[in-house]
Each structure stands twice: as C-alpha cells, then as structure tokens.
Amino acid sequence: MNRPQFYEEDLFLFFNGRPRELALYEALMKKMEAEFPESTMKVQKSQISFYGRHLFAAVSLPRSKKSFPEHSILVTIGLPYRLESPRAAVTVEPYPGCWTNHVPVWEEEQIDSELMDWLREAYIFSESKR
C-alpha cells in the first residue's frame, strides 16, 4: 500500500492519546495492505482515506461517544447499495446509486471476513467509476 511521506507522524497525531483505537486501525491496516497492495492512503484531519482510482473506504474516530462504543473506530465503506446489516450503524445515499455505510469496530475480532468482503466490494465498485 502506498503511504504518504509523513505517514508515521500523521498517524501519531491522528490517534494521539487513543492507543486502543490505534491498535484497531493497525489490525485493519494489516489486512488491507494484504488485500489492496496497489492502493493509496492519505491521513487527513478527520479521516484516513483509502484510494484505488477513487476513494473506496475511510477510517475515522466517532464524533459522538454516546452513539458508538468507547474506544472504537468507524470504517466507512462506499457501495452501490445500502448495507442491510446490524453492523452498519449509519447509511446514507449522498447521490443515486452510491451508499456511504459506517461500520463501527471496537474489537479486533470484528475485522473479519464479512468486513473485508465489504471493503473488497467497495474497491471493485470504486474502480468501475469513470
């Protein structure tokens, strides 16, 4: 996976004071690097974005602690359909035929084959866009 020049420093700032969330992210990254070796990632102020030709997924920290478990990360997955799963906490259709699905992760075991299948679908969907 292609990482930006100051990846380690940016990652430290992004997860500053949140070692549990960092550990979850690192577990997810390990699987994503194996699955999407040609993809690119970018650490931004509010999220870590993953790109093929286009954005296909992101990781962020929940803004509302009341709505999500403590010490969790949100995995955002772009799909051509709404995720009909109890794991999808929030789903929106920002434009027709494209759904943004937010899946909270608070245990490493939740970074499973189902989540990776959704990420794989999101990657394929993003690659099919013009």
Image (cartoon, rainbow, N blue to C red):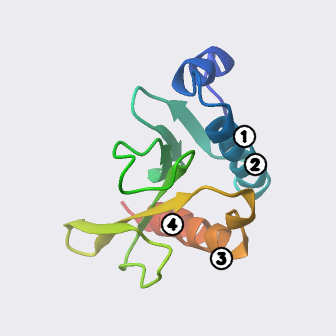
Percent coordinates x, y for residue 66 in the rendering: 36, 52
Give the residue pinned by disc 4. Answer: 122
Which residue occupies 66% across, 36% down? 22
Give the residue pinned by disc 2. Answer: 27
Percent coordinates x, y for residue 52 in the rendering: 54, 50
Which residue occupies 47% across, 69% down? 125
As drawn, 40 above or below 99? above
Give the residue pinned by disc 1. Answer: 23
Write down the quadrant of residue 108 in the picture. bottom right
Q: CA distance from mark 2 to mark 4?
A: 19 Å
Q: CA distance from mark 3 to mark 4?
A: 12 Å
Q: Is residue 52 visible?
A: no
Numbered disc in front, either 2 or 1: 1
Write down the quadrant of residue 100 in the picture. bottom left
Say whether marks 2 and 1 touch (CB < 8 Å). Answer: yes
Name the element at disc 4: helix
Q: What amino acid is found at the position of numbered circle 4 in the picture?
A: Ala
Q: What amino acid is found at the position of numbered circle 1 in the picture?
A: Ala
Disc on the earlier residue, 2 or 3 = 2
Q: What amino acid is found at the position of numbered circle 2 in the picture?
A: Ala
Q: Nearer the viewer, residue 19 or 113?
A: 19
Disc on the earlier residue, 3 or 4 = 3
As drawn, 55 above or below 101? above
